[in-house]
Image (cartoon, rainbow, N blue to C red):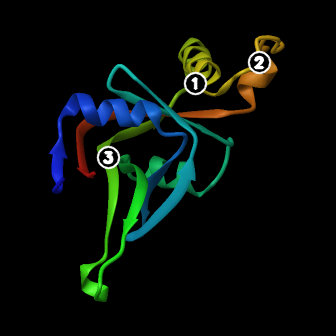
């Protein structure tokens, strides 16, 4: 099958399936790219973060971000180097990022992380100290686009 643009629904499906993604921010006209854990919910991406670091500094200075998830499926060898290809899918998100201050919004986002990443029903409940020790980045999605070759 040839390369194709994904529908918004298919792009969201892949966003929900991917385990981690890459967040791109900018500081002093220099790109900064970092792998992150995330969840998608109601046209927002939430990213779990330490309380301090380069990505948070960059977001405070410039809230414009790009986020990427992708998955290589199969290498397609060719007889010549320019004939090689890959079956894959990829999704790009552009939006505005902010750092959540509201405790209730942080709790709601952390519950989404637990739902996505937890496979143990015996987790101890979160307490306010735990919640204060993490930052949650909220990306309000402006555009989503996806592409696939499979």
Judge from the rendering whether residue 45 lies leftward or rightward of residue 149; answer left or right: right
The residue pinned by badge 2 equals 120
Earlier along the polypeptide chain: callout 2 or callout 3?
3
Q: Residues within 10 Å of mark 2 (few under 14, many from 20)?
A: few
Residue 95 drawn at (x, y percent): 30, 41
Location of residue 107 (image quadrant): top right
**Dot 2 and dot 1 residues touching (CB under 8 Å):** no
Judge from the rendering whether residue 70 lies leftward or rightward of residue 83; answer left or right: right
The residue pinned by badge 1 equals 116
Residue drawn 38% across the image and 52% down it: 62
Residue 4 drawn at (x, y percent): 15, 50
Check disc 2 and report its element: helix, strand or loop. loop
Check disc 3 and report its element: helix, strand or loop. strand
Earlier along the polypeptide chain: callout 3 or callout 1?
3
Q: Residues within 10 Å of mark 3 (few under 14, many from 20)?
A: many
Q: Residue furthest front?
A: 79
The residue pinned by badge 3 equals 91
Check disc 1 and report its element: helix, strand or loop. helix
Location of residue 135 (image quadrant): top right
**Distance from label 2 to label 1 (Cα)?**
11 Å
**Distance from label 2 to label 3 (Cα)?**
29 Å
Residue drawn 48% across the image and 39% down it: 18
**Dot 3 and dot 1 residues touching (CB under 8 Å):** no
**Distance from label 3 to label 1 (Cα)?**
19 Å
Who is closer to the viewer here, 144 or 60? Answer: 144
Residue 101 vs 128, above or below: the answer is: below
Residue 53 vs 18, above or below: the answer is: below
């Amino acid at each position: 099958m040839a390369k194709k643009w994904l529908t918004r629904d298919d792009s969201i499906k892949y966003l929900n399936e991917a385990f981690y993604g890459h967040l791109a921010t900018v500081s002093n006209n220099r790109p900064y790219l970092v792998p992150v854990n995330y969840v998608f919910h109601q046209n927002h991406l939430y990213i779990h973060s330490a309380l301090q670091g380069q990505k948070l500094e960059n977001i405070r200075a410039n809230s414009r971000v790009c986020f990427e998830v992708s998955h290589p499926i199969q290498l397609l060898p060719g007889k010549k180097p320019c004939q090689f290809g890959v079956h894959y899918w990829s999704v790009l998100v552009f939006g505005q990022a902010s750092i959540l201050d509201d405790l209730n919004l942080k709790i709601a986002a952390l519950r989404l992380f637990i739902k996505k990443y937890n496979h143990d029903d015996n987790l101890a409940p979160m307490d306010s100290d735990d919640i204060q020790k993490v930052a949650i980045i909220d990306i309000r999605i402006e555009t989503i686009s996806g592409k696939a070759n499979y």
